[in-house]
């Protein structure tokens, strides 16, 4: 596909940044709903839960007391302490609060990381498929995202051997996600350690997006921070903590890089939302954590329902997702083109899912991403609609 022509008064880098197709699909579904159609949304990765009551109370208290001024660019000290305690309590590792930068969502954390580490024409390795905005963050700083095809035999993730095969003189680092969007799959701990070791040998950087790390269902909790202080980790309050619209995240960086990251944060953002930060502190209270763990168990229950149900319909799911709230399903038995199928199912069955087009070229025609971040009732109704639709096509 040829890059679109960019008007002369706009930066040429925009030619390398594609639209976020899932958002375009969601807009189409909304228009159909306005016309009276019933839609079940299994597209956007947004929990159907909202912030827990202790979090809402903390935000209300901050507003009543007028604690609404700027914070330090690195975030409220008590929030950084709370995040540090979270790593200690859940993962059994000590992460100094000074290494933690609070950001305006994980997107701001990724922006800071790319601003600090990606130079013009520098190559950053990542798997195909992967979250589309990751490659666009690299492109925004005139770097090049090198998308390495990865199939179910590698859990749709990179491996040490793939990294060594593709590393060249222009490669500066890797950008990984575990668990991944769109696949819901994690990198096996030993493999991730080998990847980090290989990058370290090359003098490169390793960024690991862990925004779904709180939503892992089958293994003990694990963070890439346990592999060394040179690993840069990104996390968010959006997924496990159900705070998508609050725009709050964090970034853990090597202490030696902190002054440079702080300088960028001061200039680009000033600080994350103060109200959201005070609310974020309450996320780590025992009352809130108990609520989030109950919701995590509900996500697992939904996964355990939807995976066999989709397989019964005819979707091929070669790797059961172990985290997040996505199923990456091969639809070749049902259609020749995933993009066309997604549009067809939205218009004819009222079920919205995302074609692989957003996530890379390797699996674009064969896979759809299905989000189970909706109620069990909605999932059951979606399965009923899909069964009825495919049954009607056979007649």
Image (cartoon, rainbow, N blue to C red):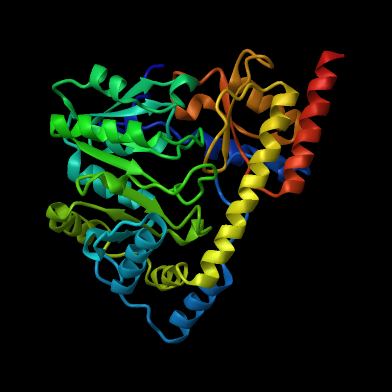
| The N terminus: image quadrant | top left
Instruction: List the single residue furthest toward the bottom.
Output: 65
- Tell me: residue 212, above or below residue 135: below
Q: Is residue 309 visible?
A: yes
Residue 129: x and y in percent read: 44, 27
Residue at left offset 61%, top offset 56%: 295
Who's the residue at 50% across and 21% down the image? 364
Give the left or right position of residue 117, taking residue 60 as reference.
left
- 240 lies left or right of 172: right
Q: How many marks?
A: 0
**Which is nearer the eye, 9 or 114?**
114
Viewer-closest of 272 and 14: 272
Q: Position of residue 378 (x, y in %)?
A: 74, 45
Residue at 35% x, 21% y: name it: 148
- Quadrant containing the C terminus is top right
Q: In the rendering, at what x and y percent does residue 31 appear?
A: 67, 42
Percent of width and height locating residue 338 = 60, 21
Q: Is residue 204 above or below residue 73?
A: above
Residue 8 visible (yes or no): no
């Amino acid at each position: 596909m040829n890059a679109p022509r960019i008007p002369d008064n706009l930066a040429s880098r925009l030619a390398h940044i594609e639209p976020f197709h899932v958002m375009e699909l969601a807009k189409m579904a909304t228009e159909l709903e306005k016309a009276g159609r019933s839609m079940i949304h299994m597209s956007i990765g947004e929990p159907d839960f909202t912030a827990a009551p202790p979090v809402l109370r903390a935000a209300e208290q901050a507003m009543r007391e007028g604690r609404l001024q700027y914070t330090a660019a690195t975030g409220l000290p008590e929030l950084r302490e709370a995040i540090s305690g979270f790593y200690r309590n859940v993962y059994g590792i000590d992460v100094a609060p000074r290494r933690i930068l609070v950001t305006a969502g994980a997107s701001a954390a990724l922006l800071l990381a790319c601003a600090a580490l990606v130079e013009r024409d520098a190559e950053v390795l990542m798997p195909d498929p992967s979250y589309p905005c990751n490659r666009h963050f690299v492109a925004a700083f005139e770097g090049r995202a090198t998308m390495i095809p990865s199939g179910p035999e590698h859990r749709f993730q990179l491996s040490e051997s793939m990294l060594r095969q593709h590393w060249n003189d222009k490669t500066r680092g890797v950008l990984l996600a575990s668990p991944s969007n769109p696949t819901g799959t994690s990198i096996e701990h030993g493999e991730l350690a080998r990847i980090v070791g290989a990058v370290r040998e090359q003098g490169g950087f390793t960024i690991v997006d862990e925004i779904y790390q709180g939503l892992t269902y089958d293994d003990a909790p694990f963070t890439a921070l346990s592999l060394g202080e040179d690993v840069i980790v990104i996390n968010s309050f959006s997924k496990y903590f159900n705070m998508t619209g609050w725009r709050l995240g964090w970034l853990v960086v090597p202490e030696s890089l902190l002054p440079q990251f702080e300088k960028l944060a001061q200039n680009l953002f000033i600080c994350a939302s103060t109200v959201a930060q005070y609310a974020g502190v309450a996320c780590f209270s025992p009352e809130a954590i108990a609520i989030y763990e109950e919701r995590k168990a509900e996500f697992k229950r939904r996964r355990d329902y939807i995976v066999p149900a989709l397989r019964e319909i005819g979707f091929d799911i070669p790797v059961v997702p172990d985290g997040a709230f996505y199923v990456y399903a091969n639809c070749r038995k049902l259609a020749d083109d995933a993009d066309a199928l997604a549009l067809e199912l939205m218009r004819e069955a009222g079920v919205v899912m995302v074609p692989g087009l957003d996530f890379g070229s390797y699996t674009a025609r064969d896979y759809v991403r299905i989000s189970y971040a909706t109620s069990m009732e909605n999932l059951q109704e979606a399965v009923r609609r899909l069964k009825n639709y495919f049954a009607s096509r056979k007649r």
